[in-house]
Amino acid sequence: MMGSVTVVVVVVMLIMVAVVVVVAAAAVILLKCLVPFVESFSVIEVLFGMRILVS
């Protein structure tokens, strides 16, 4: 009984670690993807502002 319990505990811990790693990787990827978009949006806003000022 104890052997099977330890196996279950180890499997659950491994699954939790895997989930944490996947979530962390997804967060890093999302940040890397979002930062250029945010920068491009700010650049577009600045360009529109310049156009409005020029016009």
Image (spheres, helix red, strand yellow):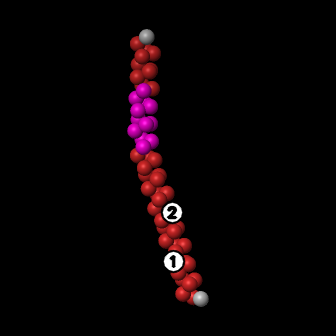
Secondary-structure class at tag 1 = helix
The magenta-colored residue range is 33-44
Q: Nearer the viewer, residue 54 or 13?
A: 13
For label 2, the crowd category at 10 Å Cα-Cα, with few meaning under 14, some 14 to 19 and many 20 or more, is: few
Secondary-structure class at tag 2 = helix
Marks 2 and 1 sit apart, C-alpha to C-alpha, by: 14 Å
The residue lying at 43 percent from left, 11 percent from top is 55
- In percent of width and height, residue 47 lies at 40, 23
**50 with respect to 3 (left or right):** left
For label 1, the crowd category at 10 Å Cα-Cα, with few meaning under 14, some 14 to 19 and many 20 or more, is: few
In the depicted structure, whether residue 54 falls above or below residue 16: above
Question: Principal SS element in the magenta part?
Answer: helix
Q: Does label 2 or label 1 sit earlier along the sequence?
A: 1
The residue most toward the top is 55
The residue lying at 45 percent from left, 42 percent from top is 34
Q: Amino acid at mark 2?
A: Val
- In percent of width and height, residue 24 lies at 46, 57
Look at mark 2 in the image and give the residue it sits on: 19
| Quarter of the N terminus within the rendering | bottom right
In the depicted structure, whether residue 53 falls above or below residue 14: above
- In percent of width and height, residue 3 lies at 54, 87
In the depicted structure, whether residue 31 falls above or below residue 43: below
Is 15 inside the magenta-drawn segment? no
Q: Nearer the viewer, residue 2 or 48?
A: 2
The residue lying at 40 percent from left, 46 percent from top is 32
Q: Nearer the viewer, residue 18 or 54?
A: 18
Is 34 inside the magenta-drawn segment? yes
State the mark number for residue 30.
none
- Image quadrant in which you'd find residue 9: bottom right
Q: Amino acid at mark 1?
A: Val
Look at mark 1 in the image and give the residue it sits on: 10
